[in-house]
Amino acid sequence: MSEAADLSNSNKQKFVADMRVVVADAEEILRAAAGVAGEKMADLRERIGERLRDAKLRIADAEAALVDKTKAAARATDDYVNDNPWRDGGIA
């Protein structure tokens, strides 16, 4: 895997981790606001709850895609090295 691909995967992993923190913080705010009365607040809590559920699903999908791409890149690298052992030895 190239250095640029490693950096890209690292950035994606950091993004997923950062989004998990944002979702956790938003859930904490939502729980803290649970005792606040009012129709507008109830509507807001419901909308935020829905968006948080959607965000969690998208984060899980992004993480799964990242894992799949990482595995595919590792397989491609392994296949290349196995198919071209003389090149690998020459580089070393």
Image: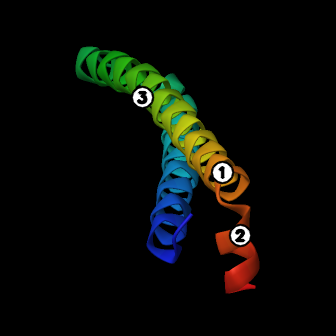
Q: Residue furthest left?
A: 40
Report crowding for label 3: few under 14, some 14 to 19, many 20 or more residues within 10 A (C-alpha): few
Within the image, what quadrant is residue 42 found in?
top left
Name the residue at 47% across, 56% down: 12
What is the C-alpha distance between the residues marked 3 and 2?
43 Å
Within the image, what quadrant is residue 24 found in?
top right
Q: Position of residue 25 (x, y in %)?
A: 54, 46
Look at the numbered disc 2 and give the secondary structure of its residue.
helix
Q: Amino acid at mark 2?
A: Trp
Residue for badge 3: 58
Name the residue at 37% across, 17% down: 50
Disc nearest the viewer among 3 and 2: 2
Disc nearest the viewer among 1 and 3: 1
Residue 91 horizontal side relative to residue 48, left or right: right
* Quadrant location of the N terminus in the rendered image: bottom right
The mark nearer the N terminus, 3 or 2, is 3
Name the residue at 49% across, 34% down: 65
Give the number of the disc on residue 10: none
